[in-house]
Amino acid sequence: ILYIIFYPRGVKTVAGEKADGVGVALLTILFVALAFLLQLSGTYWPWASPTTFALAVVCIVSLVLFVKVELKVERSGRRPAFRVTLFKLRPFLIATLCAMLACIVTNGVATYAPSYGQTVLGLTATQSGLGYSVGSTLVIVISLFHGFFFGKKRWFKECNTISMLVFAAVAILLIVTGAKLPFMAFTLLIAMFAAVTAWGSSVNFVIGQVMVPTEDVLDSTAGITAMQTTGAFLGVALNSALINLTGYNGLFTLCVVCALACLVVMLFLKDPQKQAN
């Protein structure tokens, strides 16, 4: 909104191109409407309400208009706010899909893990803090693990496979054990959250940056960030609905589904450098 109000019309960027103000405006409207739709519907007004319907219409219309405007800007030779044609690149498409799936789980678990640990498992605030400490440590360990293999072997699929299998196994263990091992279960929950956080932040960005043409790196990074933001909104809304309908097992089941979906998507990833070699 501030960009629309204060950015003078006709001002040119450093590259000598006019800024894509229409695209930025439509993208802003889309994400603001999406935030209200997914995070406030069902809490401040019913899901089956005129407000929810109106927000859904705004999201759909702004998305369609945004895609049309960006394609038109790109065809004209100008630089769009977001290059929609990047989705034609398989590495970018896979990275963005996995980024969204990872953030669905990450934000859902991050939002509801404290209530799960203290209300369902009966943990104290201190025990919850210790569980989060274990998760924070695992973030560092897993990030170093990924960094080593990325730097040495470019083993994207291998790193994804190991992370997602561990992630799914922990989620299944939580479904089976429930509250039988309170502190252990909560610690494993945070470990699962840590694994997918480290995985999502490292693997997807690496794929989106080193497996696309050099001239597309900036646009690719911006696109992956946008999909992560979308996944964050979806994660809170989906997990809230699942907890209300099925309890916390619904959240863990979604974790398993997203992990397996990422594994399936990764089957279609091909490393251009390995193919060239």
Image (tube, helix red, strand yellow):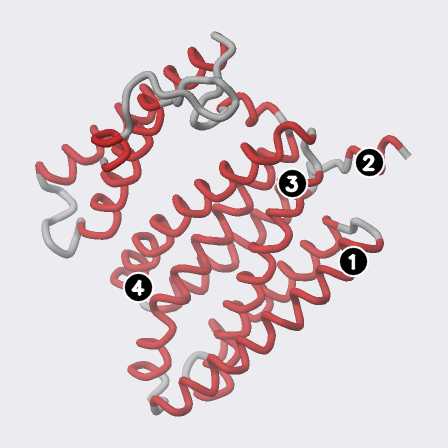
Mark 4 or mark 2: whose residue is earlier in sequence: 4
Q: Is residue 231 left or right of residue 61?
A: right
Quadrant where the N terminus lies?
top left
Residue 176: where, in percent of width, then height?
A: 49, 75
Residue 191: where, in percent of width, then height?
A: 54, 74
Mark 3 or mark 1: whose residue is earlier in sequence: 1
Q: Is residue 167 above or below residue 123?
A: above
Q: Report crowding for label 3: few under 14, some 14 to 19, many 20 or more residues within 10 A (C-alpha).
A: many
Residue 264: where, in percent of width, then height?
A: 63, 44
Mark 3 or mark 2: whose residue is earlier in sequence: 3
Three-letter code, disc 1: Phe
Mark 1 or mark 4: whose residue is earlier in sequence: 1
Three-letter code, disc 4: Ile
Three-letter code, disc 2: Gln
Q: How many marks?
A: 4
Q: Report crowding for label 4: few under 14, some 14 to 19, many 20 or more residues within 10 A (C-alpha).
A: some
Circle 1 residue: 149
Q: Nearer the viewer, residue 86 or 90?
A: 86
Circle 3 residue: 209
Closer to viewer: mark 3 or mark 2: 3
Circle 4 residue: 243
Q: In the image, which disc is placed on residue 273?
A: 2
